[in-house]
Amino acid sequence: GEERGKGESDFALKWIGSICRAASSLYLQRITQIPSLSLSGSKQLCSDIDYFVNVVTALGTETEEGLKRVGHFLSCSKEELLLLQDTLPQSEDRTLFQVVLSLRQY
């Protein structure tokens, strides 16, 4: 009855969440393997990341924060990136920031 339906629903949400986290992680890993991007390629990747994040959010789960950060960095102009460079702490953000600088060939 009702308890079985709730249990199935909980299982489905956990399953979807697990798949979305794995897909986010794989997406981020693949992005870090891109050797370089043109300005239009950067804009397209930023749009693709935004779309992915929106779909995952609509499914009721979260994406990897690093993927969101890469999307944010890709949306920045060269000037904004250079200003950010001095304010980022030594962390995963700095590593992802360096990936974006490399992608954009700055």
Image (tube, rainbow, N blue to C red):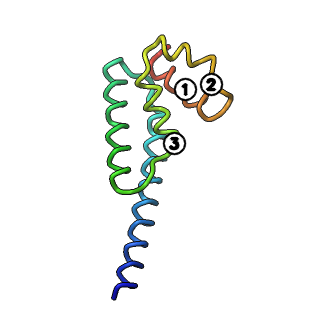
Q: Quadrant of the N terminus?
A: bottom left
Secondary structure beneath dot 2 equals: loop
Residue drawn at the location 38% of the way across and 77% of the way down: 8
Q: Which mark is residue 65?
A: 3
Are the residues flagged by discs 1 and 2 in contact, CB closer than 8 Å?
A: yes
Instruction: Tell me the element at label 3.
Output: helix
Which amino acid, mark 3?
Answer: Glu
- Going from N to C along the chain, the mark reached first, 2 or 3, is 3
**Residue at 61% across, 28% down:** 94
Instruction: Determine the residue located farthest toward the front in the rendered image.
Output: 2
For label 1, the residue is 97
Mark 1–mark 2 distance (CA, rounded to whole Å): 9 Å
When the figure is inspected, residue 59 is found, relative to residue 83, above or below; the finding is: below
For marks 1 and 2 on the same chain, the one whose residue lies earlier in the sequence:
2
Furthest residue to the right? 90
What amino acid type should be assigned to the residue bearing mark 1?
A: Phe
The percent position of residue 86, horizontal first and vertical second, equals 63, 17
Mark 2 crowdedness (10 Å alpha carbons): few <14, some 14-19, many ≥20:
few
Q: Residue at x 32, y 36 (%)?
A: 48
Q: Residue 50: image x %, image y %? A: 35, 37
Q: Quadrant of residue 3?
A: bottom left
The part of the image, by quadrant, that contains residue 35 is: top left
Is 10 located above or below residue 58 in the figure?
Answer: below
The Cα atoms of the two marked residues, 2 and 3, are separated by 15 Å
User: What distance separates the C-alpha of mark 1 from that of mark 3?
Assistant: 13 Å
Mark earlier in primary sequence (1, 3): 3
Label 1, residues with CA under 10 Å away: few <14, some 14-19, many ≥20: many
